[in-house]
């Protein structure tokens, strides 16, 4: 059996077409959704991510503002910029690209963003809303994973989902989203004694630790759905995920590739969150 691929590029195109149509409708009512992205320093990966986010805004008809600041920017200066964007009525979403230079407290900066503009879903108010099932912005990567499961018509109720990783950005919110859909959820991490014993029970596995081959074919139950959130490089320097793709695709029922899987969905869900932030103004 060879797994079916869940094509993140194709699903992203569908969702972005819907976003573009909704943006056009909002513009007809005098509102152009706006996203502000702040980049501090010269991190090469961050520059690529930021460029892709700005391009996605342009492609869907949104307004985008990109602020580039040197790594010497002080924490107080950055907080002042966030405060100004909070007050800017043309901006509906604010994203401060992580990581930040070591002298800046990233959590303090995230908490300075208005929860109404926290389209990354990292604010403590957003995390609390997700935990309690209240309306709020969901972190984009796990939100994208949920859309991928929805796209294959997967019924999560009663299924056993295993999340490998417990970060605030992916692992924890992923587990809560799966729980909301009535899955039985196990979170595994570096302290888990027998990861294979856990994953072999799983109907759905989300690998999100940033470590190559953390999930191999012998750890996957036949027919399971495997979502690979990892972004790593193999020995040849090519992009790969956390999953041994070649092996796992011979066992799983569905699997996401890297690249072309979860990655495109992350930016697409950022567009969705920014659009929804603007739509709330006319709801």
Image (cartoon, rainbow, N blue to C red):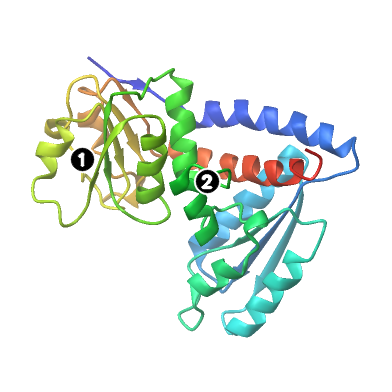
Please report the residue visible at 69 percent of the width from the left and 33 percent of the height from the top.
19
Viewer-proximal residue, 256 or 149?
149
Picture quadrant of residue 72: bottom right
For mark 2, what is the residue? 138
x, y (%) of residue 120?
56, 53
Viewer-proximal residue, 279 or 13?
279
Query: Dot 1: within a 10 Å radius of its alpha carbon, few (fewer than 14), some, or many (20 or more) residues?
Result: many
x, y (%) of residue 137?
57, 47
Q: Is residue 41 left or right of residue 238?
A: right
Element type at mark 2: loop
Viewer-proximal residue, 43 or 167?
167
x, y (%) of residue 124?
50, 61
Element type at mark 1: loop
Classify 113 as above or below 101: above
- The disc, 1 or 2, on the residue closer to the chain's N-terminal end is 2
Using the numbered discs, state the Cα–Cα distance from disc 1 to disc 2 in whole angstroms: 26 Å
For mark 1, what is the residue? 215
Viewer-proximal residue, 60 or 221?
221
């Amino acid at each position: 059996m060879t797994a079916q691929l869940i094509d993140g590029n194709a699903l992203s195109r569908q969702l972005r077409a819907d976003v573009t149509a909704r943006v056009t409708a909002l513009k007809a009512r005098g509102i152009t959704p706006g996203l502000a992205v702040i980049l501090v320093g010269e991190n090469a990966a961050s520059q690529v991510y930021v460029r892709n986010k700005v391009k996605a805004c342009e492609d869907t008809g949104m307004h985008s503002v990109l602020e580039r600041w040197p790594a010497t920017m002080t924490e107080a200066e950055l907080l002042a910029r966030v405060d100004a964007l909070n007050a800017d009525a043309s901006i509906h979403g604010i994203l401060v690209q992580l990581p930040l230079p070591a002298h800046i407290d990233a959590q303090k900066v995230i908490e300075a963003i208005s929860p109404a503009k926290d389209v990354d879903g990292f604010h403590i108010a957003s995390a609390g809303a997700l935990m309690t099932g209240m309306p709020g912005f969901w972190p984009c990567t796990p939100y994208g994973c949920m859309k991928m499961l929805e796209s294959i018509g997967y019924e999560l109720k009663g299924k056993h989902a295993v999340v490998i990783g417990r970060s605030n950005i992916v692992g924890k919110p992923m587990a809560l989203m799966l729980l909301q859909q009535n899955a039985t959820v196990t979170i595994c991490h570096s302290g888990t004694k027998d990861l294979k014993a856990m994953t072999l029970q799983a109907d759905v596995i989300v690998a999100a630790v940033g470590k190559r081959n953390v999930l191999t074919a012998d750890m996957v139950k036949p027919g399971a759905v495997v979502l690979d959130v990892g972004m790593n490089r193999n020995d040849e320097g090519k992009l790969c995920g956390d999953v041994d793709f070649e092996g796992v695709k011979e066992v799983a029922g569905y699997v996401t590739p890297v690249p072309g899987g979860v990655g495109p969905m992350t930016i697409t869900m950022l567009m969705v969150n920014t659009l929804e932030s603007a739509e709330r103004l006319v709801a």
